[in-house]
Amino acid sequence: MRMMTLVAVVLMAWPALLVRAAESVTKEKAVAQGRQVVERALKYLVSQQQANGSFQHSDREPPAVTALVVQGLAHSPAYGAKSEAARKAVEYLAGVQQSNGGIYRDMLANYNTAIAISALASLDDPSEKARIDKAVAYLKGAQFGDSIAGANGQRINPALAGGWSYGGARGGAPDVSNTAIVLDALHDSGLKSDDPAYQAAVKFLSKLQNNSETNSAPWAGNDGGFIYNPGRNGEGNSAAGEFTTPDGKRALRSYGSMTYAGLKSMIYAGLSKDDPRVKAAWDWVRSHWTLEEHPGMKAAGADSAKDGIFYYYNTLAKALAVYGEPAITDKSGQSHDWRLELIAKLASIQKPDGSFVGEAKWMEDNPVIATALAVLAVESAVGDLGR
């Protein structure tokens, strides 16, 4: 009798065991494919390294390009943080750290410093702590705050408080992208989520979400996505453009990279999945799932559909990895394992020499930049599959 019961239990469980076995094989194949994509891409990138250790091909390109490649090398089993290519690149980054702690040459100070911090943190090398700490202090001092005053003593627009701009003399207004990149750096450096820098950033980001429940801006809608920045006078600005609603209201379009950047930043700051801002962003993700284009951008013009798509892939992968949900159920009810789909997509568009190339906007026609971003996206997906 006991034997018959045991057989019955095994037979009942067998289909589920087969499904799990199939899923395991699928994941193993995806991991192998992802690692192959990364190794081919890094081989291409290493071939582009300059004599000074950098990966920039001209003075117009920022040190952040080198910092992106360092992260890819550090996370790769085939190269690693102690590889010659990584070592030379880190020496270059050390050489451009300023006395104020920032890691940049002559412009885009916050942007370059933040990506460099993430690169140095990826080395997992205690000897880099002092350099990282100096750079973190620089960034925390560059955050827009309520006390910042203009040239004539005027207070800044409250909509700017808590954010980060590109930095430097031409840094402009703070925006979702630079704020998210800085929060990447703070998170990677080990800064805890209860630090005031995160909390101020969340207040800034909340003012750039299309979520009228938590954002009182006149342009705010209810799709849950994010726009780019508050504009000069709080009017809002989106790379995906604006439109007029049926009732005559001016509205700003949300788009993919900014929405994933906002979602990731809120998770870093300790917000839970039940927070209305997180829930709204997740609803946008479910309603706009695609890897074929940069969602939201096509509305600005058909030729803009793939603008910034590698930045989109990288931000998507980071955000979904920290959100911790491997399956996304889209608006039609179909389930997507983002890790498997992202690896397959990037494998399908990799060039024979291992590189990736995107559109000219945001410099993604530069194969070093596009390839570095693709590497980081695939490494996030492979890493999440391995958890």
Image (tube, grey):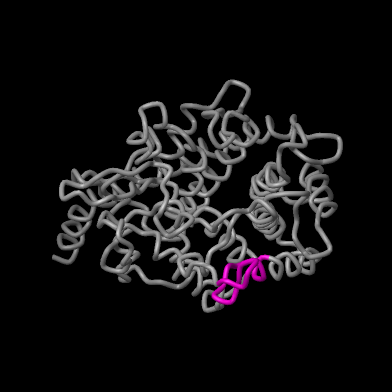
Residue positioned 63% across, 53% down in the render: 171
Is any part of residue 176 visible from this angle? yes
Q: Is residue 140 above or below residue 341?
A: below
Which secondary structure type mostly characterizes the magenta part of the structure? loop
Instruction: Check if residue 145 falls in the magenta segment.
Output: yes
Left or right: 236 in relation to 383: left
Is any part of residue 36 visible from this angle? no
Left or right: 97 in relation to 120: right
Q: In the image, which residues are magenta?
A: 139-154
User: Residue pushed farthest front?
Assistant: 152
User: Residue pushed farthest top?
Assistant: 352
- Between 290 and 166, the one nearer to me in the picture: 166
- Between 207 and 103, the one nearer to me in the picture: 207
Instruction: Check if residue 344 falls in the magenta segment.
Output: no
Residue 317, given in percent of the width and then of the height, sits at 47, 49
Number of dots carrying numbers: 0
Left or right: 215 in relation to 137: left
Residue 257, given in percent of the width and then of the height, sits at 44, 47
Residue positioned 58% across, 57% down in the render: 165
Left or right: 313 in relation to 222: right
Image quadrant assignment for residue 151: bottom right
Check the picture and name the quadrant holding the N terminus: bottom left
Residue 127, given in percent of the width and then of the height, sits at 81, 65
Residue 72, given in percent of the width and then of the height, sits at 64, 45
